[in-house]
Amino acid sequence: MVSTTLKKHNFSAGPAILPQEVFEEASKGVLNFMDSGLSVLEISHRSKEFDSVIKEAEALVRELAGIGDEFAVLFLTGGASTQFFMAPMNLLKEGEKAAYINSGAWSAKAIKEAKHFGNVEVIASSKDANYTFIPKEYNVPADAAYLHITSNNTIYGTQYKSFPETSIPLIADMSSDMFSKPIDFNKFGLIYAGAQKNLGPAGVTLVILRKDLIGRSGRTLPSMLDYNTHVQKGSLFNTPPVFPIYVLMLTLRWLKAKGGLKAIAKHNEEKAAILYKEIDENPCFTGTANKEDRSLMNACFLPTKPEYTEPFLKLCQEAGISGVKGHRSVGGFRASIYNAMPKESVELLVEVMQQFARTQG
Amino acid sequence: MVSTTLKKHNFSAGPAILPQEVFEEASKGVLNFMDSGLSVLEISHRSKEFDSVIKEAEALVRELAGIGDEFAVLFLTGGASTQFFMAPMNLLKEGEKAAYINSGAWSAKAIKEAKHFGNVEVIASSKDANYTFIPKEYNVPADAAYLHITSNNTIYGTQYKSFPETSIPLIADMSSDMFSKPIDFNKFGLIYAGAQKNLGPAGVTLVILRKDLIGRSGRTLPSMLDYNTHVQKGSLFNTPPVFPIYVLMLTLRWLKAKGGLKAIAKHNEEKAAILYKEIDENPCFTGTANKEDRSLMNACFLPTKPEYTEPFLKLCQEAGISGVKGHRSVGGFRASIYNAMPKESVELLVEVMQQFARTQG
C-alpha cells in the first residue's frame, strides 16, 4: 500500500476536494477573520474586509484567465442550473435561434431551459452513444445568436480538448473543468461555472461575460435576472454569498501560488495519465469514454465483470477512498481528480485497483 | 465600563452576529465534518452526512414555526431579492392584481419587481414620512391574488406588532425578524427570509410556502424559478449551498436549545427595552421610528446635534462596538440586536451612550 499522510481520499464529483491549506485558512476565518475579531460569517458585505476579498477574487480570476476590461467577472448564486436560463434570457432575442452541442445530461438541461426563450438548434449530439464522445462534426449556423457547449461532462468523463471556431459568440458551461488548464478565455462570449469542483465550495457561481453582450436579448427582466444589474453593482446588488466567495478567493490564491494554470495542467495530466494507464492495463476494469475525449477531471470505468462492483467499492472504502461510485446513467466507477486532488491519492487508488486484480486473478 | 468577555460587539444590520457556539462548531466542521475525516466544504450534497443536515434543518424550521405538511420548507439562494420576483412569477396570474403595503425600501423593491408580472396596488404606504411608521389604515382588496408585507424594516427600525387579517393569501418578507418571536406562521401563504440576520450566514434563503399555492400563476417557468421544482426535489434539484445550510441548521439548533421562540422573544424584548430606554432618556440621542412600531431587531437613532456623529462613532469603535452607523437614508445610528446579540453587548452600548452624554454635558 502506498504510504500517505492523508486519512481520507475524496474522489467525489462535486462538491469536491479543495486544498487542505484552504480548509485550514477558512476554518480560522470562521472564528476570527483577518484579525478583525469577527467571524467571516458575521461581517457585512459592505465592510472593507469583504471588499478586499471580492476584489482579490476578481483580480485572481482576471489574472488566471488573462482577460481584460472587455469582460465582466461576476460572483452569482444558483449554479449552472441558473445560468442555463439566464444565458438565453439575456442573450437570445425573441424568435431568434441558438445553437447547442449536446454532449451530456448537463448540455441537455441547458437545451431544455433555453427553449423557454427562443429556438434551439442542436447541431451535434452524442446522446445515441450514451455520451461516450465529444461531437466533432457539425456546422455552426452563422445566424444563431450563440453556440453553447459543456466543456467537461462530469457524468460521462469526456472533455473538449479544443474548442469550436465560431464567428458567433461561444458560451461554455465550464463548471467541472474551470481553471484546470490554460485555454484562450478570450475566445468566449460567456463562461459560467458552479464553484463546487475546482473553484470553491457550493454556493457561488463564477460568470465571465463579454460586456458587449449585455442586454443583447432586449428583454425587460427582473433586476436579479439581468446580468447588467450585477455588472453595474460589482456583484453587490444584493447580499452575496460572503463565505463561499471568501473560500473561492482562497482557492484561487492557492492555484496562483501553485504556479497557475500551466502548472496545474501538468499536475492534472500526470494524475490522469497514471489513472488511465491502470484502467487500460488492469484486466478487472475498462474505460467508458472514447480515448481521445477522456476527461482529465473525471475518469469513468466499468468492472469487466458485474460482480466486481461491490467488492471493489468495499476495498476502496477500507483504504479511505470515497466518492468513486459511478453515476447511475453510466454505472461502475468514477474517480474525480480535480485540481486539489493530490497525486498520492491517485497513486493509492491505482494501488487498490492492482490489489483488487491480484485477489481476483 | 461594563466588563465583558467579548472582544468585539457586532451591531451590523446583516450579515450579522451569529451565536459564538455556532462559529466554533462551524469552524470545526470546515476541518472535519461529523468525524467523516472530510471538510463540510468538500462533501457531496447527496451524502448521508448532508442528508442528515438538511433534514434536521427542515425539521427545526417546522418545529419552531409550528407548521404541518400543508407547508413546504425550502432552502434556496438569491436572497429576498430573488423572492421579490419569484413570488409574483409563481403566484400572480397574467392580468391579475396583487396588493402591497409599502413600509420601506425593501417593500418598494418588492413592488418594483412584482410589476413585471401583473398589476400592483399599493394599498398603504409610509413613504411620505420616510417610513417612520407601519401603515395601519387600509382595505385589502378581496380580488387581489395576495397581500405582500415586509415584517421588519431594517433601515428604518420599524416592525409589525400584529399582522393584517386577510381573506387572501398573506406573503411576508421576514428577512430581518424571522424566528425572533412566536407568531402564527399558519396565517401566511408564503414567508421568505434571507438567512443573514437571525438564521445563518449569507448564501441561503428560507422559504415557507403553503403547498396549495404552488403553480397558482399558471406560468410555464424555467425549472429553477418554479417553486414546484424545489418542492418536488426537497431543495436538491441543483447543488444547494451546503455550508450556509449547515450553519443555518446549527443556528436553529442553538435557538431551540435556548428555549425556542418564546424564550428568544423575552431575550429580544429585554435587550430592546434597555436600548430604547437609553435612546429616550439620553439628551444626546433621539429615536427615529414611531414608538408603537419600534423594531426589536434594529434600533435607529439620531444625534441631537449633527456634530455628535463622528465622536460617538469613534467612542463606539474604541469600545469594540462595530456596525452602528445608520443607513444613509436615515442617517445617525442603527444598532441591530438580532437573536444572537448578547445582552451584555447592549449594556455596553448603553454605557458608551451614557459616557458620551457625560463628556458632552
Image (cartoon, coloured by chain):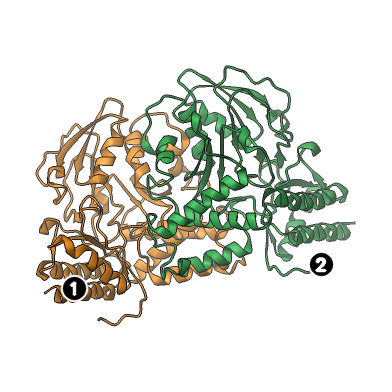
Chain colours: A orange, B green
Question: Which quadrant would the N terminus of chain A be assigned to in this image?
Answer: bottom left
Which amino acid, mark 2?
Answer: Met
> Does residue A186 appear left or right of residue B83 in this picture?
left
- From the image, tell me which residue sits under label 1: A356
Query: Residues at badges 2 and 1 in contact (C-beta under 8 Å)?
Result: no
User: Quadrant of the rendered structure where residue B6 is?
Assistant: bottom right
Tag shown at residue B1: 2
Q: Is residue B103 above or below residue A351?
A: above
Question: In the displayed structure, would residue B10 be above or below residue A348?
Answer: above
Position above or below: A43 against A28: above
Between B14 and A57, the one lying in front of the other is B14
Residue visible at 37% across and 56% down in the picture: A196
Q: Nearer the viewer, residue B190 or A206?
A: B190
Q: Mark 2 lies on which chain?
A: B
Q: Which chain carries label 1?
A: A
> Where is the C terminus of chain A found, in terms of image quarters?
bottom left
* The furthest residue to the right: B361
Residue A139 rendering spot, x and y as whole percentages: 11, 38
User: On the picture, is A174 further left or further right than A227?
Assistant: left
